[in-house]
Image: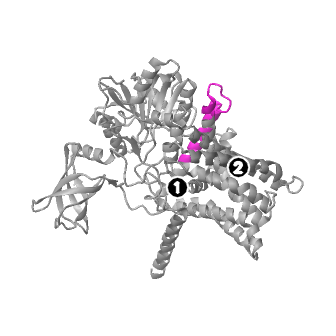
Amino acid sequence: MQLKLYKKVLSILAVVLTIIYLIWRIFFTIPSYQHHEFAFVFAIALLVSEIISNFTAFILIFLRLRFNKKHNNELALPEISQYTKWPDIDVIIVTHDEEISLLQKTVNAAANMTPGYEQKVNIVIADDGNRLAVEKLAMDYHVKYIDMPEKNNAAKAGNINHALQQLSAPLVAVFDADMIPFKTVLLHSIPYFIKNDYEQQEDENIKKLGFLQTPQSFYNADIFQYNLFSEKTATNEQDFFSRDINVLNGSNGAAIFTGSNAVFSRDAINDAGGFPEKTLTEDFELGVRINMANYTSMATEIPESSGITPMDVKSVIKQRIRWARGVTQSARNIHIFFNRKLPFINRMILTNVYLYWWSFMRRLLFILAPILFAIWHVQVVDANFWVLLLFWAPGYFLLHYVMGMSNTNIRGERWGEIQETFFAPYLWLPVLLETFGIKQTKFKVTDKNNGQSTRALLYGVPYLILWLLDVWALIVFNYGKWGSEIMYGAVISFWLLTHLVNLTFSLYLAWGRQINRKFERFAREIHGIIINNDQVESVIETIDVSDRGLSFKSPGPLLLRIGDHVMGTLYYNDESIQFTGIIRVTYSNNKYGLSIENMTDENQNKFYSLIYDGQNMSLPWKQDAWMTIYDALLINMIYHLKNSWHRISTKRNG
C-alpha cells in the first residue's frame, strides 16, 4: 500500500495542477448573474461540486502519502508468546428476523473458532425477535441465548446494549447474523490488543486500542459483479473501502466501524456510552465516539469472515439509503466538523466519509451540465476552449491516474464512477432531506433473499431518461459540425460520451441478469472417495462445493451416469464428512456434479465448516487490469442484444 517515490511525486504534481485549475475556475469561469439566473445558480453548484470532489481526492492522496513503512509494520500480525494468557471474549451474534438456515451457518462457524492460549470464548445469540427456533438453535450448539423481554425500539443498537448488560468479558466481538466468521478470526485479531497492552505498559502516552475492524467480505458476487458479467474480473464494490480506504483510516488511528466482524475493548464501548440508539448507523457513530473517548481504532486488510450481499436492485438501493441517512444523522449528532475531542486527522477522515454521501448529487450535476449546454445552450462554464483545455486537462487526467494507482489494485476510477452513477438518482434526495432534519427512523434489515423481480425494472427509468437526454445532446451538439468545430466541442462531447457509458452500465444493472443458482459455489479442493451402486470405491478430489452439492474429478473414468445414487466421504481437517447423493451432471475429463440427498446433523456442520471457513476463491481479490471498461461494455451489449433478439424470436414463433 506504501507508494513509491515517483508515485509520490506524481501525486503532489496532480494536486498542484488541480489546485491551479480550481483557482482559475473560481475567478474566471462563472457566467454573469444578469445574463442567466438559472445558469449562474447551476454554475455555482457545479463549481462547489468540483471543489468538494477534488477535496475528497486530496484527502485520499494525503492518506496514501502518509502511509509509510511504520504503518505497514503496524498492520502485520503481532507475534505473541505461546505462554501469554489471552483475554476472554464475548462473541455476540446479532439477529432480528433472518432465516434460521442462514443464522445456523454463522453459529456453527462461531462455535468452531480457534481460541488463544487459555482464552475463554463465550458465544451469544442476541435475538431481537424472541424466536423459539433461535433459542433451540442456541441449545443445539451449546451457546448462550439472550432475548429481548420487552419491545425493542432501538433496533440493532438496543439489542446489543441489552446483551452487553449480561456479559462481562474484557473483549467483545460483534457479528451480524449473515457474517460467517473464519476459524482464525480470534487468532488474527486478539494479538493486536495484547500487543497494545504491552506497549501501554512501556509508554503511557500510547492510546488504548478501542476496536479492530476486519474487512466486510462477501462470498457471493454483488450486483455490480454479477449483473455486469464481471464476477471474474471486478472486485466487490465494498472492497475498495474495506480493504483499502479503511486500512488507511486505521493507520491514522481512526478506522470506521462497519457494523460487523469487529473486536472491541469492553472499556471502550462503556466509555463511549454504549451503542448509539438515536441513529440508523450505530456502527459508524460508535466508532467515532470511541475515538472521542481517546481510544484508537485500526482496520486490517485480510478478511476473517464472509457474508452474503444483496443482489436485487431494490434491496441494494434501500440499504444504501439507510447508510446515507445514518451517516448524515451521526455526523450531525457528533458535530464532526468542529468537535474538539477529535484530532484533526480524525475530522479529516470523517469529513471524507460524510462527503462521500454527497458525491451522488455531484454526479447528477456532472451529468446534467453538458446536457444543459448541448440541448438548451445553458452555459455554466464561461471559458475559451484553448484556455479551458490548458487549465483543465493536465490536472484532470493526472489526478485520475494517481487516484487509480495503488498497490492494492482493488478498483479502478472508472468503476467508481459507474457505481456513483448507479446510486446517484436514488441517494441525492435522502441525503438532502436528512441534512435538513427530515428523518427516516424506521429500521429494516436488508433482505438477502437474492432475486430480481419484474417490478425492479422500474428502477431503470431514471437512467433511461438521462441516457436518452445524453444521446439527444450528443446528436444535437455535433450535428452539422465539421473539422475545427468538432474539435472545439471536444470537451463537451468527452463528458457526454463518458456519462453515456456510465448510464449504459446503470441500465444494464437495473435490467439485471437471471440468477440460475440457488446456492453459491465455493472453490474447494478436498480429497475423498465415492462408492457407486456396485459398491466400487474410487478416489476423488472436489472442484467446488455448495450447501446442497459438489462437483468433483477423478484420476480415471468412474462410469457414473446421470441419476446414479452414490455414497461419499470427504476428508477435511483430519475428520470425515459422509453423505449420500445423486449424480446430476457428467462432464468430460472424468468430472461430475452431484446433489447431496442425505447427511446427518454432525456431518452437515462439518460440511458447513468446509464451505464457509475461508474466502470464496472463485471471486477475484484484485481487479483484472486487462479487462477495461470498454471490454465489459462490449460483453454486456452482446448479452443484452442476444437476449432481446431471443425474446422477439420467441414471441414471433409463439
Would you identify the image quadrant in which residue 101 lies? top left
Q: Nearer the viewer, residue 642 or 646?
A: 642
Q: Residue furthest bottom?
A: 653
The dominant secondary structure in magenta is helix
Q: Position of residue 255 (x, y in %)?
A: 52, 35
Residues under labels 1 and 2: Cα distance?
39 Å
Q: Which residues are magenta?
A: 319-347
Mark 2, secondary structure of its residue: helix
Callout 1: SS: helix
Disc 2 residue type (three-letter): Leu
Q: Which numbered marker is on residue 313? A: 1
Q: Is residue 456 above or below residue 26?
A: below
Q: Residue furthest right?
A: 34
* 499 part of magenta stretch: no
Q: Earlier in the sequence, mark 1 or mark 2?
A: 2
Which residue occupies 49% across, 27% down? 210
Task: Tell me the number on the disc at residue 17.
Answer: 2
State the residue at coordinates (70%, 66%): 493
Location of the C terminus (image quadrant): bottom left
Q: Position of residue 551 (x, y in %)?
A: 27, 59
In the image, residue 62 sits, relative to residue 623, either above or below, namely: above
- Three-letter code, disc 1: Val
> What percent of the width, then of the height, locates residue 459?
57, 58
Q: Is residue 588 above or below residue 282?
A: below
